[in-house]
Amino acid sequence: MLPAFPGTAGYGALRRALTKLGLRHAADVLRPPRSAPHRGFHVVGGLWFPGRGPDARLAVDPGFLEESRNRWQASGDSRAPEAVAVLRTLAAAVDRDPAALHRIVLYQLSCLLVDGDGGPTAGAARALGVHPDDAGLLADAVAAGFPPSGRVRRAAEEIADAWQESRLVRAGQLAAALPAAPADPVLSALLAEVRRATESVERLMADARALVRRGRPHEAAAAWLAAAQKAVDDPRARTGLLGAAVLAADADAEREGTEGGEPGGDPGTGARDGVRAAVSAGGVRVTWSPAPHGAVPYGGPAPWYRTVRFPEGAPHKAVEVGEPGPGGAVSDPDPPTGRKLRYAVIPLRGDGVAGVPRVTPPVLVRPEVTRPKAVPVPGGIRLDWEVHPEAVEVAAVRRPAAGRGTTAASGAASGAASGPTPVPCGLHGLVDRPLPPGRYHYLVSCAYVRGESREVVWSPGREVTARAVEWPSPVERLVVDAPDAPDAPDAPGFPGFPGGPDSPGFPGFPGSAADVVGAPRLRLSWPEPERGQVRLVHWHGRPAEPGEDVSELLPELPPVRVPSPDATAGGNGNGDRDRNGEAPAVPGDGRPWSGTEFVPRPGARNRITAVSVLGGRAVAGASVLVETPGAVGDLMARRLDGDRIEVWFTWPEPAVLVLLRWEQDGGRRERRIPRSLCLGTGVVLPAGAGECRITVVPLPRPDADFAASGPAVTVLPAAPAQAAVPATAGTAVAVPSVTSAVPVPPAAPAAPAETLTDTDTDTPDGGSPDGSSPEDGSPGAGSGSRDAAGAPVPDGSPAAEPSGEEPSGLSPGRRSWWRRSAR
């Protein structure tokens, strides 16, 4: 009778090992390389090889297997180690069943004959090594009904392994694919054992459910354990065992009068029966005592442990945490948040459950904020932290260092005004101010959404201690103006010059020509802050907000250049006295003011910021933006005819606008002239024959608070009485910051008046009205065209590129007119 299945556990691994060795079936490993030839082996009456004589036979028994191992080891073949391992596996199978090797070889020969191209024939059997006396009989038996490759054969090959490993569910599935009453007696006996074991497990599970209903969880856990040990792959047995273990642990805790395993235990930490689950920033840490409750058999292997996690009341959702091992701790780095969890430690022996799992009390995972950092800021405290990705809200409660109060969640909900004070915060931090100096405690708690119920649960809270320190007060105002100027009866009424109530209100400028040509001096005044000392610094980049912490930036901020004390009468050079050595006048709010003169950088935009310093802390205060454009130079005018005049001047770089005013016959007109419309051309103005007073002054950009530049003034005399009016140059009037103009020879006709309008022209900051950037070093109208040595360029010859610098040391008579470019 041919076996319908291999009849031994581990057949799959044995077949893979033979394939790796390049052998067709198990009998091939019994014939080592370079052994004596023989006429084949017999398989019908039993597994044996011919001996030395014609009638001698060598039975394949444990002794023959040992002899085969020795021959392989002495062969020198590279496959010897793997072949010896296969022979040891066969010897173990023979120890369990003397006919096991015969059944394995016969089964493999049958598979090879059925799967062969020519089918099961005597010739095919002889080619496989079968003795000629048995080859025909074997071929006929295989052809009579050995199953072909497919579902039935795979079931026959796997069922012994499933049964051996107590995988009863899998064994039952494989048994369903095989005949209910197979002719193979070994297979028939195995299927009967599978059916009996399945019925036994079903009875155990039914008894366990009944014990749970009667309130006997410990007996129910023992019944579930027996079922789980017989059917290690049955999910019902595993789920029932975990559920019964939870009931038994809770019953023990109730009997002992403890909640959470420890009297007054935190719901975020569970400890019971030697197993503990602690919630931390890194997840949940589960620890237990290495010895299970129950004895380890004397001389037996120490158990390993598997840790699982499942939601409260749902053991069927258990998932494994970490890897099984002999240790007493495992970490769960990413547990679900906002819901109650249980952790169970299951002792294992081999692949089977060795005892009832030990279960923790419910653990509510509500991670606290991590990496909290407290930083003092002006007027209060800033807290920063990190939160768990599933946190939906964060609440913070402040209390003084001496106080102890409610949790952050309750404080945030109550909004109590006394005692603990809720502080508005975001997911990642808060800024709490104003606060008086002192030590404070913050309780920071995180909110999580619980499962499908969408209930919000709060963490107990993490306490963060912070200290508010005293900061300097920011300077509230910073005023800039020109120092007192001497009387200037000819001044046109600009700031810094007496001009009467009809003064046009040009931007301020220093009060002496020496200040503009050399180093202009301005005066800064500010009210003294309540706390701290004031430092004036040049600020670059984005202006700081008043009260902003600039402690780290302060060493890099250049101080404002202050004249020496001897240059400022009575001053101390530190910016705390005016030039007469007395405190500046109080502007009217009753607070003392301080002031100093300073020298702005010429030809630049100077943003001056008052910084208050106290100890190692500094805050920004008020700022002013001072522009110091160059002075208008070479201002000249001439008449074109009886109703037009032409004005020329050197452009005051880096200004983008100038204000040109001309006064005649008691009237006054003004124009704002952009730099882009005044490059290399004169300005043509409508004017009568009477005397005309012309004034040009640079204008600051719209965001500037002060412009440190004065006006240039010239007076064009009245035209002669004759009808024909020749082109004549005007006479310059010397005023502060202006180089006197002198008559110059007539030049080409000036640009027509239509090139300019009498309305204000708006320009972007630092550019022309049309958005174009001014050419580097381009001169304004009236800047003389000359060669590198300063000599005039003859008419019609190319003019040298102007340097853009204010000419000095040259006689006005050497300066010629710029010719207007062709349009």
Image: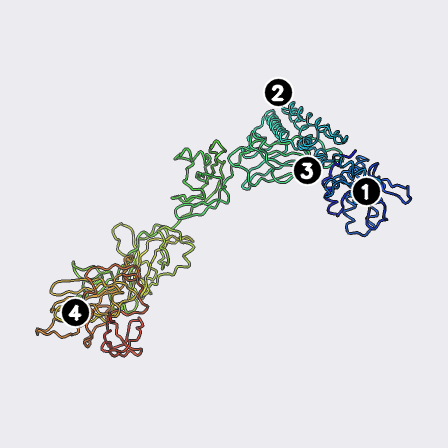
Q: Amino acid at mark 3?
A: Gly
Q: Is residue 294 left or right of residue 448?
A: right
Q: Is residue 103 above or below residue 39?
A: above
For label 3, the residue is: 150
Circle 4 SS class = strand
Q: Is residue 77 left or right of residue 371?
A: right
Q: Is residue 599 visible?
A: no
Circle 1 SS class = loop
Of circles 1 and 2, the one toward us is 1
Q: Nearer the viewer, residue 801 or 540?
A: 801
Q: Which mark is residue 111?
A: none
Q: Residue 755's image quarter?
A: bottom left
Q: Amino acid at mark 2?
A: Arg
Q: Residue 416's image quarter?
A: top left
Circle 3 SS class = loop
- CB contact under 8 Å: marks 1 and 4: no
Q: Amino acid at mark 1?
A: Val
Image position, residue 683 (x, y; %): 21, 68
Please state, as top left, top right, bottom left or bottom right, where the N terminus lies in the image. Answer: top right
For label 1, the residue is: 130
Of circles 2 and 3, the one toward us is 3
Say which label, 4 or 2, has the lower sequence index.
2
For label 4, the residue is: 645
For label 2, the residue is: 214
Q: Nearer the viewer, residue 586 or 397?
A: 397
